[in-house]
Image: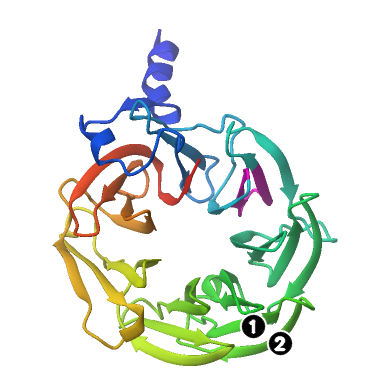
Amino acid sequence: MKKTRFLLLLLPLILFTSCFEDKDTKKKNPYSETDNGLYVLCEGTGTDNNSALSYFNFKDSTSVGDYFTEGLGKNANDMISVGDNLYIAVTESACIWVVNKKTGKAVKRIETIDSDGNNRMPRRLTYNDGYVYAACWDGNVIKISTTTNAIVANCPTNGRYPEGIAIANGKIYVANSGGKDYPNYDNTVAVIDMNTFSFEKHLTVLKNPQTVKSYENKVYVLSTGDYSSTYQLTVINNAEIEQQLQMNITDFDFWQNRMYFFYTSVYSSPSSNKEFNFSYLNIDNMNAEPTIVQQYLVDGMVMPYHIIVMDNTIFITDAKNFTSSGDVFALSTSGEILYKFPVLINPSKIVKK
């Protein structure tokens, strides 16, 4: 009896199907019937075996907590879409999963183990011209063929604990965070020539660079320092630093020549974190004062975690208390809540099916 009761309590956390609360979802939903839904990568709680791939179905407004029944593993950190497949980097489980977007089933598990049997610890992913590139905590970028789904080469970043990665103008840019060497962070961005797949040089930024994204042939690097003072956003153009802005940003994304971003203090507990600076900048005038979309937490949102902008819809993931199931909020570009849906622990990346 006790075992049955335990399983009944546990089941909703592992695999739930939930009808969305907003009856007007389909009216507000910008996608057509052929756009079946959204995949949401849920990181889980680090070293626990609870990373998951959640799924939201547009047609009937339902969500499934753990759609990938084979189990992602421990500490899934990034997900990108390439053709018919998703590529998902799972740090502690030493692998990159290839998952079919149409079926949600595994195509292949790519083991990220070096020649000495050590876990390379893949963190972030990017794609270009038939290859996925993964920044790994072992200090390398690995190159994966999307034809064979096999690792074909690796290149050192000559830095510590690489994190974010992006491509622009034939160069790969990788943030050397040094994150696990706290408080001795790294402060470099590695520039790798994509044609030769070889290290070219370092660019110096504020210590602890984390997020790297490209837009319109430029690269944007967010450095968080020691989290106690103003962060820095570095704009890189043709492998040279073009601009460095002192501003606090938790996460950012681009849409129609704008950079949408928000900030929540890492030192604020979910219950006391009432301010939510959701804003945007026109990328042609990054020195201007940001346009504020929302100054306070969106109703029902507890801890904004990541932002993804697609098709005039701004998705903000809510990590809640970082140990329980979260939500995804869909907002208009003016900050209106369009709909939300439940997912599992620490939702981060979102990809259309």
Q: How many marks?
A: 2
Instruction: Residue at 37% x, 45% y: name it.
Output: 323
Tell me the residue at 40%/90% (across/down): 244
Q: Earlier in the sequence, mark 1 or mark 2?
A: 1
Q: The magenta stretch spans which residues?
A: 84-98
The mark found on residue 166 in the picture is none
Q: Amino acid at mark 2?
A: Glu
**Which residue is outermost to the top?**
1
Q: Is residue 210 above or below residue 151?
A: below
Answer whether labels 1 and 2 touch (C-beta < 8 Å). Answer: yes
> Pointer 1: residues within 10 angstroms few (<14), some, or many (20+)?
many
Looking at the rendered structure, the secondary structure element under dot 1 is strand
* Front-most of residues 328 and 321: 328
Residue 241 placed where, x, y %? 50, 91
Could you tell me what secondary structure mostly forms the magenta stretch?
strand
Gap in Å between the C-alphas at discs 1 and 2?
A: 5 Å
Give the residue at x 24% y 69%.
Answer: 279
Looking at the image, residue 97 sits to the left or right of residue 114; the answer is: left
Amino acid type for the residue under numbered disc 1: Val
Give me the residue at 59% from left, 40% from top: 72
The x, y position of residue 274, in whole percent, is 15, 60
Residue 92 shown in magenta? yes
Answer above or below: position of 252 versus 315: below
State the image coordinates of residue 127 (x, y, percent, origin top left).
63, 62
Front residue of 51/213: it is 213
Q: How is the protein colored in the picture?
A: rainbow
Q: Quadrant of the N terminus?
A: top left
Q: Is residue 239 magenta?
A: no
Disc on res. 191? 1
Task: Determine which of the numbered discs, if any, sits on residue 200 in the image.
Answer: 2
Left or right: where does residue 312 sit relative to residue 201?
left
Q: In the displayed structure, does residue 23 sit left or right of residue 182? A: left
